Amino acid sequence: MSEWKEVALQDVVTILGDGLHGTPNYSDDGEYYFINGNNLRNGKIVVDERTKKASIEEYKKYKKDLNERTILVSINGTLGNVALFNNEKCFLGKSACYFNVRDDVDKLFIKYVVTNRHFQKYIDIFAHGSTIKNVSLKTIREYPFELPPLPEQRAIAGVLSSLDDKIDLLHRQNQTLEALAQTLFRQWFVEEAEDDWEEGVLGDVIEIFDSKRIPLSKMEREKMKEGKLYPYYGAASIMDYVNDYLFDGEYILLGEDGTVLTDEGYPVLQYATGKFWVNNHTHVIQAKYPYSNYFIWTYLQKKSIRDIVTGAVQPKINQKNLKSIDFPKYPIEKINDFNKQLSPLFEKKITNNSQIHTLEKLRDMLLPKLMSGEVRIRGGIL
């Protein structure tokens, strides 16, 4: 590794700054989105119905030098989210910083530098603030790491991005499968609904396994990294992988507190299969016969639940309110037909999820090893 050199992040960028410390004049018909750290997700800038907009005139007052070399990182509130800038029409708030990677350094390699858990630990250690954590630009600029020659940077980024591309493809396949399930459900149980179907509630058709949940701190999870690893689920996503599990089977996870609603007002759902661990921020449920988990999943995916969410500061869905969600008593023959039709779709989704978890674990295992030089790429081969 003699050709690798230790640098600071400020050594490989032409500029590093943050966004507007203040509030622009918003405009509902504006062309530009005003984004913050929570708009940076899975390497992309994500805007939704809550993202404010402003006019081009307002944008010009506060615009930064964002270009094809720009990487964004959240530094206030939510820490460490990363996104590449791809000429989106947006400008930044103060909870996100931006830096433009030098032309003689591979941009994707630097993206993985700041995605690496070493960087994530670094900013967590140096974060300050009792209520809302934040990291200074000075801390970001001074982050130290090992920089290989440009050809090896590109090779490392190529390996990692190929894994991310495969993961993204599988996620998009799952979205297509879920759309097909929704189309069939809507036709059979909404458009062809019968007036004589009795009313019911979700609590009649599910079992809840929340009592089996056990939260683990970051420190506890770091001690559980030896051997075979299993997903550790939070309210909205897999947060980590640990070498033990609480559940083994097929379950629906529904966010209980924190992240509980999508932008459209639907519940935040995850379809968990196999062996996994769950913290105490998501409900763990299974369907009762004759319903299937994928029937319940499809119903809940487009079910507005805004009226059962409590908590002004920390949104929450308690068990009582979860059970009270209306759920008609559908004819058993239609339930059985739907289950039969949906079974192959969800089997494919489960297979995809298994592949996604495998690829994510491989990527997360390789990432720190490649970035430290512990694993080397020679001639494009690990």
Image (cartoon, grey):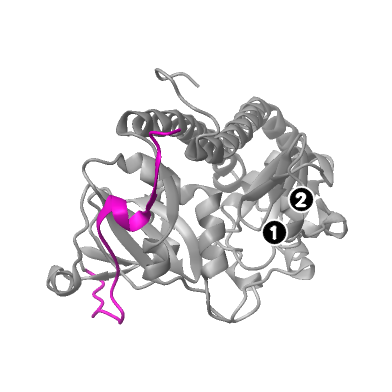
The front one of 79 and 61 is 79
Q: Horizontal placement of 246 versus 131: left or right?
A: right
Mark identifier at residue 342: none
Q: Would you call the spot at circle 2 few (<14 residues within 10 Å), some (14-19), or many (20 or more)?
A: few
Task: Give coordinates of residue 141: x percent, y percent.
Answer: 36, 62
Q: Horizontal placement of 341 versus 278: left or right?
A: left
Is residue 210 visible in the rendered image? The answer is yes
Q: Secondary structure at mark 1?
A: helix
**Image quadrant where residue 365 sits:** top right
Q: Considering only order in the chain, which callout, 2 or 1, is on the residue closer to the N terminus?
A: 1
Q: Secondary structure at mark 2?
A: loop
- Residue at 26% of width from left, 77% of height from top? 26
**Image quadrant where residue 228 sits:** top right
Q: Would you call the spot at circle 1 few (<14 residues within 10 Å), some (14-19), or many (20 or more)?
A: few
Magenta segment includes 170: no
The front one of 331 and 301 is 301
The front one of 240 and 311 is 240
Task: Give coordinates of residue 345: x percent, y percent.
Answer: 61, 28
Mark identifier at residue 218: 1
The front one of 47 and 358 is 358
Task: Give coordinates of residue 157: x percent, y percent.
Answer: 40, 34
Range of the magenta residues? 1-29
Task: Residue at the far front: name it.
Answer: 2
Magenta segment includes 3: yes
- Residue type pointed to by label 1: Lys
Is residue 200 visible in the rendered image? The answer is no
Q: Horizontal placement of 111 versus 257: left or right?
A: left
- Residue type pointed to by label 2: Lys
Please identify the quadrant where the N terminus is shown.
top left
- Residue at 79% of width from left, 47% of height from top? 286
Mark identifier at residue 223: 2
Mark 1 and mark 2: span between their CA atoms?
A: 9 Å
